[in-house]
Image (cartoon, rainbow, N blue to C red):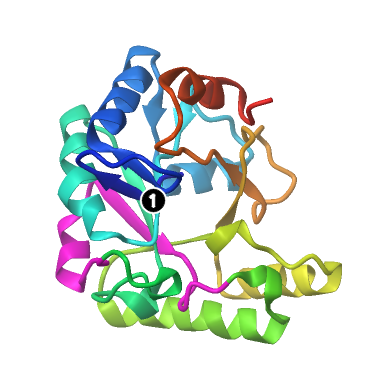
Amino acid sequence: MFHKIDPELQDALTVSAPQFEQQLQWLQDHNYQTITLEHFATSLHQRKSLPDRSVLITFDDAYLNNLTHALPILQRFGMSAVLFVPTAFVGRCNEWDGCTDPLMSIDQLRQLLPTFELALHSHRHLNYKHQTAAVIQADLTENIAAFDALHLPYTRAFAYPYGGRPKDAATKQAMQQAMEQLRIEMAFRIGNRLNRLPTSNRFELQRLDIRGTDSMAQFARKVRFGKLL
């Protein structure tokens, strides 16, 4: 799970372009292969194993720097990625975080294809940990409707903003039922552990949080083993 790519800056949400290139080189050197959400969905539905060392490279929020800095590096390595888009903010900025960075417009999102697949990241970038089942269902419905209105290809896969899901069991069950009704194939939390397939819950898939403050040794350990001890 990545957020921002910058020519030089490295922080909790930002990986530098040289770092990102080094990380992709490590994946390539160690025989990891990127897969698509469609490939992953087929594996989940048919309960089939994926090829060894399969990896999804994912980005959250649709920062403009994903187009300017991540895309050319991914293309150079022949790797694919997924971008989870909060549709209310297309062409605007990260208003949930003080508008510090521009987000992509419709035309800019289109330029990512086919290297990037586009997918769902809530309409309003809501933390579902703090929402009612009704608010969550309305937001998911808006997220899908907004994507349809953009006339861009997308996959009905979802990433929870902030990794947040309801703590209340009944609310979480209602959310997952809404996802089923809306034909959302899968949903990703954070978790920082590897996914062992077949999974017991396709709405609780885990991702590894990659930070600009990670060393290469930490990156390699996360990819190999999951959560750092």
Secondary structure at numbered mark 1: loop
User: Is any atom of residue 210 visible in this view?
Assistant: yes
Dot 1, how many residues are within 10 Å of its Cα: few (below 14), some (14-19), or many (20+)?
many
Q: Is residue 45 rendered to the left or right of residue 34?
A: right
Can residue 52 be seen in this snapshot? Answer: no
In the picture, measured across the screen, residue 168 lies left or right of residue 218, that is right
Q: Residue at x 67, y 52 (%)?
A: 204
Asked whether 46 falls inside the magenta stretch, the response is no
Comparing 15 with 174, the one in front is 15
Residue 225, percent from left and from top: 61, 22
From what the image shows, is residue 189 above or below residue 219?
below
Q: Amino acid at mark 1?
A: His
Q: Quadrant of the C terminus?
A: top right
Magenta stretch contains residue 115 = yes
Q: Determine which quarter of the picture holds residue 93.
A: bottom left
Q: How many marks?
A: 1
| Residue in the image at 24% along x and 45% along y | 6
For this view, does 52 lie left or right of residue 32?
right
Range covered by the magenta-colored residues: 102-126
* Quadrant assignment, res 81: top left
User: Which residue bears the numbered disc 1?
Assistant: 3
